[in-house]
Amino acid sequence: MRILQQFPDKHSNFPTMLKRMAGVAVVGASALLAACQPVTLSGPGYSTNNNFNNQVNIAEPTGEVLGSGSVRVALLTPLTGEGVFGQTGTAIRNAAAMALQDYSSADLQVIVKDVGTGGAAASQQAGQALQEGAQLVIGPLQSNAVKQAGQVLKPAGVPMIAFTTDTGAAARGVYLINFTPENDVERIMSFAASRNKRSVAAILPQTPYGNVVEAALRQYAAHFGVRITTIERYKSGNAPDPFGLQAAAEQIGKVKNQIDSVFIPEAAAAAPATQLLAGQGIRSGDVMFLGSSQWDNPSLYSETMLRGAVFPAPPRSLRNLDGRTIGFDTFASRYASQFGQQPPRVASLAYDSVILAAALVAQSGERRFAHETLTDPQGFIGFGDGFFRFRSDGTSQRSLAVMEISQGSARIIDDAPMSAGGLPR
């Protein structure tokens, strides 16, 4: 073990050293690890167009500035967004402040930029961040804002770690750290295949979400050797259309002898669909019901027809490689003690994004935010939500557990992997 740097830490629950051990770099106060061999370090930025080391007319930061380091990073967040968006924007800002408190020696300044709820504001603030010397942008939250900001940042060669779940916003230089429907489908189809499930029927909503899930299902079912017997669609708005679900159940009933699993990703459809399928002679003892991370809701756990059903979900509690407890529950407890309320899930992603930026500044020199550095295939372990890695197209692959519904609760039956080797292949 070679100790690279020591960080002061006022929280005894966090490791306090940046280490490299058997090819695994552990970043201290955040418990964020880069589980990788180091990339070749030379030159700035993810793009050859990046010239942030050569800027001569860098403006002074405007807005709130967190930290006092030499490397500037911008945080685009909807502080003045309406309702839940504004609350979420504030939580993202708070999580960034927490990260810098925990990583007190981080060589970062985080410039907080309010993007409201409009794409135009995101574009304007991204341009302002460039003028103020931001070498990386974290955020924004909504898909349209990410796309607008990306149009400004990509030509300048400044990368962005964004919070949207819309993979259509991803690109080289625009990296999505959030959980996506595609991650759900990849994990659950990999698990189904590992349990020798080879023929699936699907019941999907006629919504943009349903379209994304269908595309992912076709991709990953083929990848893992699972045959799609039928895909049935139903209308869904405030609630799934019961007549559409009935028709779907009847169609699946016609091929019930050809299937060993049924995929129902929309949580609102899970209970009524399985009840209707039972009327067609299809029950959990006959097939494996597969869900999505939308099912991570205790209201579903008491449904009799869902007993034995499985779904992917980010685990709320994890063990780090050094044995310490990490995960969203630990993050949320600390956040609540400081800010007086429970954080939204995206707040932990903001925390991990700031810690990742600080860690790369400490470890990777001028190539800290290079495309090759951010997309290292061995990935990173975040304090809030565990292992993840960015793909070269800007999408991410996140570590998910598989849960089984049983006796009014859900239990982990397949752990979330903590390294690249454990991810679906």
Image (cartoon, rainbow, N blue to C red):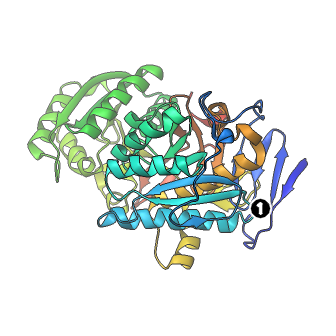
- Relative horizontal placement of residue 76, taking residue 420 as reference (left or right): left
- Name the one closer to the observer, 243 or 389: 389
Q: Residue at x 57, y 62 (%)?
A: 96
Residue 195's place in the image compared with 63, above or below, is: above
Determine the residue located farthest toward the right in the rendered image: 2
Q: Quadrant of residue 189?
A: top left
The amino acid type of the residue labelled 1 equals Pro
Image quadrant where one finds the C terminus? top right
- Relative horizontal placement of residue 133, taking residue 298 as reference (left or right): right
> Where is residue 152 shown, x and y percent of the image?
44, 39
Would residue 408 be visible to someone looking at this image? yes
> Where is residue 167 shown, x and y percent of the image?
41, 36
> Where is residue 58 shown, x and y percent of the image?
60, 50
> Where is residue 356 shown, x and y percent of the image?
65, 50
Q: Residue at x 39, y 60 (%)?
A: 78
Determine the residue located farthest toward the left in the rendered image: 243
Determine the secondary structure under disc 1. loop
Q: How many marks?
A: 1
Q: Residue at x 77, y 42 (%)?
A: 365
Q: Residue at x 59, y 52 (%)?
A: 73
Q: Quadrant of residue 317?
A: bottom right
Q: Which residue is mark 1?
A: 15
Would residue 415 be visible to someone looking at this image? no
Label 1 neighbourhood size at 10 Å, few (<14), some (14-19), many (20+)? Answer: some
- Name the one closer to the observer, 89 or 295: 89
